[in-house]
Structures are given as structure tokens and as C-alpha cells.
Image: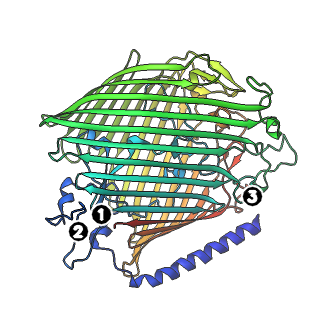
Amino acid sequence: MEKTTKVNKSILAVFIFFFLGLIQHSFAQRPIPQNGRQVQNPNQRVQQEALQQGEVEGEEQTGRRTLLDDSTRMVFGPTTALFFYEKDIKRNSLTLYPQDTSLTNFHNYDPRAKGGWKYQDLGNIGSAAQPIFYEIPDQIGTRSGFHAYDIYYHNPETRKYFDTKSPFTNMSAFFGGGNRNMLDLEFARNVNPRWNIGFEFHTIRSRKTLNPIARDDNMVEQTSYSLHTNYRSENGRYWLLGNFSRMRHVVNEIGGIIPPEEDSTSVYFTYEDAKVWLRNSQARDLRQDYHFYHEYKVRDGLQIYHVFDRKSQDIRFDALLNSTDSLFYPSARLLESDTTRNIHDFSEWKNEFGLKGTFGGFFYNAYAKLRNGRMQNPAFESDNTFNEVFIGGQLIGKLSEKWSLSADGEYLLPGAFRIHGVFQSPWLDVEYTKALYKPSSMQQRYAGNHFNWDNDFDNVGVDQVTGTLKLDIGKAKIRPGLTINRVNNYIYFDENRLPVQASGEAFMLMPSVKSAIRVGKKFQWDAEVIFTSVSGGAADAFRIPELFANTRFYFDSPAFDENVFLQFGLDIRYHSSYFADAYWPSHQQFYLQNTFDVYAYPVVDVFLNFRINRTRVLLKYNHLNSGMMSREGYFVTPDYTGIRSFIDLGITWYLFD
């Protein structure tokens, strides 16, 4: 293992020298236009009038607009390929965003890293994952209950829609060490000034980090794509947004490393040579969504709108029990003796009808929503169906650019609801949520080869208050925060891997601080620390580390006469010891355990991000401190180790013609 670490570090040094040599040849590159360099924040607001800047009066017959500078040079770029979100259209606050050319956090490319490491997974890209911290569900009605792969799904309701001056293409490739690879492709173009079409394509191919038997012995294989369009009528009264999405996510389960107490020849932290439980078990999550939003302006201050959703989630799990895999599963076989074949098919149809507008400086929205669905299973005597009716509304008052107050609520007849309010000011943000949401379909009713239940759980209640102070002191931005949760009737999976409902309440007190400090002119120090204290009768249902921290210290400056933009530094993450939830593959749920301590262990990564023109490149050496600690490595989930030292390489190209 020490020899492998030395080889990896030598490779890292070679890569660094190679890329620095490449940079030296960049002086011949055309410098980035000044305005392109200023657009570093992907959330920077661009007013709608920006669409008109630079347009020539005439248009080509194809509908494609020509953008020229004073020297008749094409200047298509990040600020001419703009995008927006449905939620902003729905709130009458159209905000156009330029393409992200920033380097900050670019090296954290995979979904778990990009989210600040706030998910617990199985140590590989695409593996089952759940949030480390408690989250209130977005849907207060019936959900499927199969959420292990949500983090890898591109939700249609948060899809980007484009308004481009020229054909726009974004190509991103991530080559992770150990053959952990991702590919992302985006394309969009305006058919005419009011109609845009496009598509996205994503893949994940992750080889097993534990006991692969071949180069292409993948743990995860995902292929997903979407088609999207948006259209505005000539008079501007009608607007249509629509997309179709599909994801096929396949995981070849390994069941974790066989504990040494179960097999004396099994040893942790041997990675490729680890002895794992499963070789013939596979999970599949297939999702398809049709989503449309359209609105019509009746008159100034009043619009009517309609949202349609048709979603399906097909969950399968297959295992051959006439192989050594049978040693992993309970001896009880409820459906078949030699094969486990668990099948659940969840579908829903949703229609939302509403009116919205502005009155007296306030935005208002009122709606009714009909939601119908069912869970199918060949072992069910009848489908588990639901029919839900919601009414809701929203009120937003924007007093100025920095002061705003909003409130929204939703009521599900006859017993679930959500009330949500947000106050924003230059020095303090406060958010409050009170909700009562329904158990998931899977928690209520399940039929598989190893488990079977039919429950009648009560709704889950939650109160959440979050506050953040905004302190800007010189070059330091400091954001102390506090989150307080009260959760009652919480539903979780116990040590027997069965769903149970807590009889008491759980109280969570979570003080935190985030900071971004400029050190001198060329260095940056970012940090986030969260403390969590859980008390109450249901405290044991929540397994959260008392201390969670991320910090990053890096060089951040243009170089080589501003032909190249560089970030080079260390990324460190840490959490205190805790009994993290274990994972059970056959019903795809995390569950409580009290014997395996996922101990405290700092993980140090070194990274190099750089940008030449509009091309960004990342180089990251994962787990730099491997072999330097008192422990041989770290765990992310009981019996699943974190990755060993790997080099990751990624690149993103933007094409604007």
C-alpha cells in the first residue's frame, strides 16, 4: 500500500509539471474579454434587458442573431448564452443567469463532493446516498420512499431553460482514479428569438473500488438524458416551458466488506483485494418524467397558469440465492427460495391550476393541485393507490434589492400541511417552516422476498427555524447561523431493518458558522463548521455527527498576464465519530446500527483548478494523507471504506457557435 501511495504521488507531481508546461504555451491564446472575466458568479443577476444588448437590428432568415464587436469579431460567450428557472417565471421575477466560468469548488465535481460532503454514501460515485442532516421533504403528500439515488437525478422542476444568441454546447468530462468516470453534455439553441430547444445527456461509469475482478467490473452504470423547450408568444402573453427526463441507474451491489469477526481472512483497507459479500445482486432505479408549465397573461397584474407532471419510478432488486450471495441475506424466503426479485413501480399524475400576479407591490399566487398515483407490486393483492387534493398560495413583498419578506403555505385535504416564511435583510436572514407530511408509500406497505409489512403510520410533524447573521469585516465574510428542529412521529428503519415510528419527539440544536476570508491579495480561506446536539425521546432515531467541518485554503489569482486563472490548494473535511446508519441493498434503505463506529478521520485533498479562455481543467489528488495517520483509512458507512489515494482529472468546454 505504501508503494502504491508513493507511485500515486509521483504521478501527481508529473501531472502538475505537465499542466504548468501547458500553461506556458498559453501566451498565444486570445485573452478573455474583460466582461467575461467579471462573470465569475453563476448566480449573478442579469436583467432581462441584457438580452437586447449587442443585437443588430436585422436577423438572419434562420432566426439566429448575429453579435459583433467594433472589430466585427464574434463575441458570443457566457453572457450571451443565458438560462433561467421555472420557479422565477412562476414568481414573476425572471432572472437570467450567465454560464458559470468560476473555478471555486470546480475540483469537487461529483454530486456528493459538490454538495459539501453532506451526504453519506457507500464510497463510490453513484452509490446509494442519504443526507447526513435531517431534511424536510419537498412533497408533503405520498412519496415513493425509494430515495437512495435522488442525488444523481436531474429533477425536471429545477431544470435550466435557455435563451441563447447562438448555438450553445457545454461538454464536461470527469476521469476519476480507479475508473470512476462521468460525462455531461448540454446543448441549446434558439430556433427564433422566442423559441429555444435543447437537450442534456449524462453518464456515470464507476468501477468497484472494493474487489473488482476486471477493469470494467462496474459498481454503477447510469445513463440519463432530457429534452427541453421554452416558447413565448409574439405578444408576450403566453409562455410555455416543457421537458422530458429519463434516468436508468444500475448498481451492482457488493454488500460491504465481510467483517473480520465473520471471516478471519477478511481484512479492511485492502481495497481491490477486499473480501465482499455480494457478487450476483443488482439494484435498478428507472425514472421517467414529463413536465410542462404554461401561463397566460390576462391583464396587467394577473396571470393564470397550469403545471402538469407525469412521473414514474420503477424499482427492481435481483439477487441469485443459489450463489454465495445467499450468505448475506436472511434465511427467510417469503416469495422464492433461489432468487430474490423485488419489484415496485411508483407512478403519479399531478395537475396544478393557479392564478398569480402583483398587487400593491406584492406578488401573490393561489392554486389548487390534484395528485393521483399508485404503487404496484406483483406481490400486492391490489395496487396501493392515493388521490390527493391540495390548496395553497404564496405572498412575496420585495421592499428593496436587499430587503424582502415572503410567506407560502399548502394544505393537503384532510390532514397534512406546510407553512413557510422567509425574511431577508442586509444583516440577517430568518426562515421558518412548520409541516405535517405523510409517510412514504414504501414505509406504509412493502412486499419483498426477505421483508413484508403493512403499516398505518401517522403523519410526521416538524418545526424548523433557521437564522443567519451576515457579518462583513474587511476582507472577511462571516455567516454565523443557528438551526432548531423539532420532529415528532418520525419514521425510520430500526436495527432489524424494519420501518418504525418514534413515539416521542426529537430536538436538534445546530449552531454553525461559514466564512470566506481573503488572505492578502492571492490567497483564500473558506470554512464551514456545524455542531449538532440531538435530544428528546426520539433522539436515537437520528444519527448525526456532533461536529462536521469543511475547510479549504488555496492560492487564487490570475497568472501569466491574465491568460490563465489558477486555484491551487488543500481541501480538508472532517466529522466526529458516530454510529452512522448501515445500508441494506434489497429494500434500498439506510437503517440504525449500534456496533460499528464510523470514527473521526480528517481527509485531505490537494487540487489544482485552472481556466484558459473558457476551458476549465481540474486536477485533484484524493486522500493525500493516506498512510500518514494512526489509522489505515476511513469509513463512510459501516463496512464501506472511503476511497484510497486517487488522481482525478476533469475538463469543461463551452462552445458558443
- Label 1 element class: loop
Real-space CA distance between mark 3 and mark 2, rounded to the nearest whole angstrom? 51 Å
Up-down relation of residue 217 to residue 134 (above or below)? below
Identity of the residue furthest to the right in this view: 264
Q: Are marks 1 and 2 in contact (CB under 8 Å)?
A: yes
Q: Residues within 10 Å of mark 3 (few under 14, many from 20)?
A: few
Q: Is 323 placed left or right of 291 in the picture? A: right
- Name the kind of residue labelled 3 in the image: Ala
* Residue at position x 40%, y 65% in the image: 654
Label disc, if present, on residue 166 of the rendered structure:
1
Image quarter where the C terminus lies is: bottom left
Label disc, if present, on residue 67 of the rendered structure:
2
Q: Are marks 3 and 2 in contact (CB under 8 Å)?
A: no
Q: Residues within 10 Å of mark 1 (few under 14, many from 20)?
A: many
Label disc, if present, on residue 214 of the rendered structure:
3
- Label 2 element class: loop
* Residue at position x 71%, y 71% in the image: 6
| Of labels 1 and 3, the one closer to you | 1
Real-space CA distance between mark 1 and mark 3, rounded to the nearest whole angstrom? 44 Å
